[in-house]
Amino acid sequence: MNISASNHGDSFRRLAIVIPVILIILIFLFILDLLTGSVNIPPDAFIKMLTGGDVKTTWVNIFWDWRLPKAITAAFAGGALALSGLLMQTFFRNPLADPYILGISSGASLGVALVMLSAGACGVGAIFATIGFIGDLSISVAAIIGSFAVLALILAISSKIKSNITILILGIMVSYISGAIVTILLQFSDESSMHSYTAWTFGSFSGVTWGQIPIMMILLLAGFILSICSVKSLNALLLGEQYAESMGMNYKTIRTVIITNTALMAGVVTAFCGPIGFLGIAVPHLCRAMFVTGDHRILVPGCIIVGGIIALCTDIISHLPGTDIILPLNAITALFGAPVVIWVIVRGTKFGRGVTT
Amino acid sequence: MNGDSILTCNNLTIGYRNQKSITKEVSKDLNLTLKRGELVCLIGPNGAGKSTLIRTITGIQPPLCGDVWLCDKKIEDHTPDEKAKTLSVVLTSPIEAGYLTAFDIVALGRFPYTNWAGNLTDSDRDIVISALASVGAKELTRRFIHEMSDGERQKVMIARALAQEPEMMVLDEPTAFLDLPHKIETMRILRTVARKTSKSILLSTHDLNLAIRCADQLWIINRAGNMISGVPEDLVLSGIFGSAFEIDGVYFDTIRGEFTIPVEKRGTFSLSAPESIEKIWTLYALERIGYTPATGPEGDIRITIGNNGGAPEWDILIEGSAKKCSSISEIIECLSTSGRGGGPN
């Protein structure tokens, strides 16, 4: 009894200590992300703004119209990417799986490329060039259509086949095909639309308007709740599909839930922020190491919070506080993410959780 | 249905249905019964259909013909939940989950009983702990699975299957990858579980010697896909056991109950000694290098085991010359240099 209580309390007790800490870090970074950027808002002005005091109008505008939606987007998108990465790593039992492994972001990229580049070829590109891609709803719609087309394809084929390795290969093939089409489109598009497209692939949390925020939040919250509801099956899947089925889990249903949920979260994030890499692969590993457990009852909430933290960090860094320079978000996430992935590979040999085969 | 039987197969045909009409029968007309508290070893050469039978019995693969009854219900009529509470498995595939303790793994066995989040109640915890205790893995409770040896991992997986509180456990080659002491330990654990908790256990194995010693019943599939079942000793006595596995150069020693390598005959011996452990192993050593017991009064060599101040001493009479040896190694040396039966080795 004592062993059981203390044992099982272990990871949960650690969670009870760590969760408040990381929540405080999340809130701190959220505020920091609001205050820093090309124009740094001093903390006392921030407090005045919240309490209704009199502050410079430019600061108020920057704060409400620019920084707040950006910070909300970063917190949610980071959590969603980390969570969908966790789902994919558990589902494929592969430590190098990421949210885009199903080809979701490739589908989204193809949708966006079709809108941006074919419009350019038809001479409508000037419109996009003048408006700029940021905040353009048609881009998000194109990305969502693209990712759900891939989702539909994956689900249709997966209902016929049993092996999830086949789904993995299918996703990679879809990525290649859409990459090829995008390349062809790029070849025939004019420079400005090519630039818009490239800028979109850099990823950014800044493009979401207040009008889009509720849609994004509702969809991602649905994804979070769906993930929390599948923690038990995710834990069972750690032992592999056959064990999970032998314990009474309905594999086909869970597979559909996990794939759809991943596509939902990764698709929505890609639609609003572009294809943001590395967060999804790196954060689940960070969480496993932080909480020292593979239990999804801890990892799911952990990934949501830590994902948000890392996304806010990268956003703050990419805006290089005090300067006008904005670095591509994907460059920053990769600079953070790649060392984590290297660590996973090196660690894999030590613990027998090898990456190869 | 016999009230005491957990699993019954009636005229079962197992195999694969590839296309609409093409079927590949692996084995047919199987009538098998597994009683409560019984340990059954399923043995047979590679490719004979052990895995197919296990997959059919556990309901992963439908039978081509006939049916499998699990506790008064056809296997396919059980809901996934009911089946999980009646039947648990230990598979050959290794577990590669990182950052899971033995407790976490065994707790997953409570899957059919826990709520939507998989939270354990106090009684669930007790069951997990007692499952770990009954496989002798209590000290592993807090260790991570990726830090364990194969033997420890196998114990944890057996505990997980136990925590599922089934009527029957099916294990696919649980002793593969283990060294001999751990093979024996695993079998001992399984036999104790079968006796104490009166669960039925079916396991496939390649360790024939172990299977003969441990099983209440053997199910043997031979290369042709024919199934013979029975008590191990009966199968040995009727010669079925040996004939199912003997291949060129290997034969079944019905006296010792194990497979041995035939050796080139070099001569006969007579051994006079009191019944002792030394006598038995001297006998084995002589057989190993190719000597058989003499049928007449005197063999080619004569050996007497004596005692020299507490240590055993062997007196050897070979071709009229006598020699004293203090170990079996010396006897073998002495026999191979004596010129009988060819040179060394």
Image: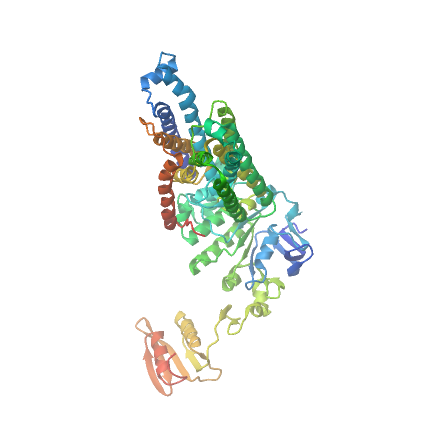
Q: Position of residue A30 (x, y in %)?
A: 38, 26
Image quadrant holding the N terminus of chain A, namely top left
**Would residue A350 be seen by someone viewing this image from the given angle?**
yes
Q: How many numbered callouts?
A: 0
Left/right of residue A57 with respect to residue B42 in the rendered view:
left
Name the residue furthest bottom: B320
Viewer-proximal residue among A48 and A327: A327
Q: Position of residue A302 (x, y in %)?
A: 42, 34
Left/right of residue A337 with respect to residue A242 in the rendered view:
left
Q: Is residue B325 above or below residue B150?
A: below
Viewer-proximal residue among B323 and B147: B147
Q: Position of residue A353 (x, y in %)?
A: 41, 48
Q: Residue B305: name its quadrant.
A: bottom left
Q: Is residue B308 above or below residue A274?
A: below
**Would residue B275 be seen by someone viewing this image from the given angle?**
no
Viewer-proximal residue among A295 and A50: A50
